[in-house]
Amino acid sequence: MALQITVVKGSGLNVADIYGANPQNASPCIRLICPTCAAPGFKQSKVLLIQSPDQSFTDQGVRFQVDAHTEPLSLEFADKDPQRDSSAMGKATISRQALRDAANSGTEMWVSLNKKNGGGYAGQLVIRVAHA
C-alpha cells in the first residue's frame, strides 16, 4: 500500500539562512528521507520557489509517493545541494501511524520543523496525506 504526501504550504521558514553568503547557487527544497534511502541520504527532493517576505509558500505541486510501511519518514527543508549543510535546515520526523491517521481522516496535518543542528524552531509545513 502506498501513500501520497502533498506539501500544501509552509511558513516561518529560514530561507535567508539557507541561501547564506552565496545566494546565486542556493535553492530551497523539500526532501523526503527514510531509513532505507541510499546516498545522498534522501529518497526524493522537490525544489521550491519562495519569494515572499514572510518566508512562506503555498501549494507548488510538491508530492511524494511512499510505501505506507516505511518508518520513520522525515521531511527536511534544506538547500537542493546536499553538500551545502546549514544549521538553519529544518527537519521533522513523522510516524507511520500519524501518516495513516491523517490519510484516514482526510484532514491537513501541521508539521513543526526543528533546526538540524542544535534544535530550535525552523518553521512549519502543512501536509495532506492520501492513499495512493
Image (spheres, rainbow, N blue to C red):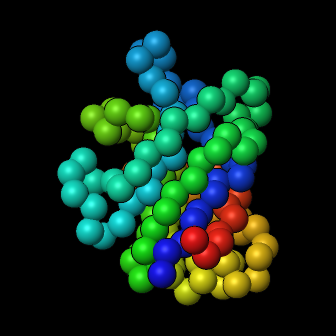
Residue 84 shows up from this direction: yes
User: What residue is at 57 percent from the left and 27 percent from the top?
Assistant: 16
Relative to residue 70, is residue 90 drawn left or right?
Answer: right
Q: Residue 68: horizontal and vertical position, in percent?
A: 47, 79
In the picture shown, does residue 66 fall above or below 22? below
User: What residue is at 22 percent from the left and 57 percent from the top?
Assistant: 38
Relative to residue 121, is residue 56 drawn left or right?
Answer: right
Which residue lies most toward the left here?
39
Residue 91 shows up from this direction: no
Q: Residue 1: horizontal and vertical position, in percent?
A: 48, 81
In the picture shown, does residue 65 fall above or below 96? above
Q: Nearer the viewer, residue 45 or 17?
A: 45
Q: Residue 88: horizontal and vertical position, in percent?
A: 49, 41
In the picture shown, does residue 12 fall above or below 70? above
User: What residue is at 30 percent from the left and 70 percent from the top?
Assistant: 35
In the picture shown, does residue 50 fall above or below 105? above
Relative to residue 20, is residue 51 drawn left or right?
Answer: right
Relative to residue 104, is residue 69 drawn left or right?
Answer: left
Q: Nearer the viewer, residue 46 or 41?
A: 46
User: In which quadrant of the rendered image does the C terminus lie?
Assistant: bottom right
User: What residue is at 68 percent from the left and 78 percent from the top?
Assistant: 102
Number of numbered markers:
0
Residue 103 picture quarter: bottom right
Q: Residue 18: horizontal and vertical position, in percent?
A: 49, 32
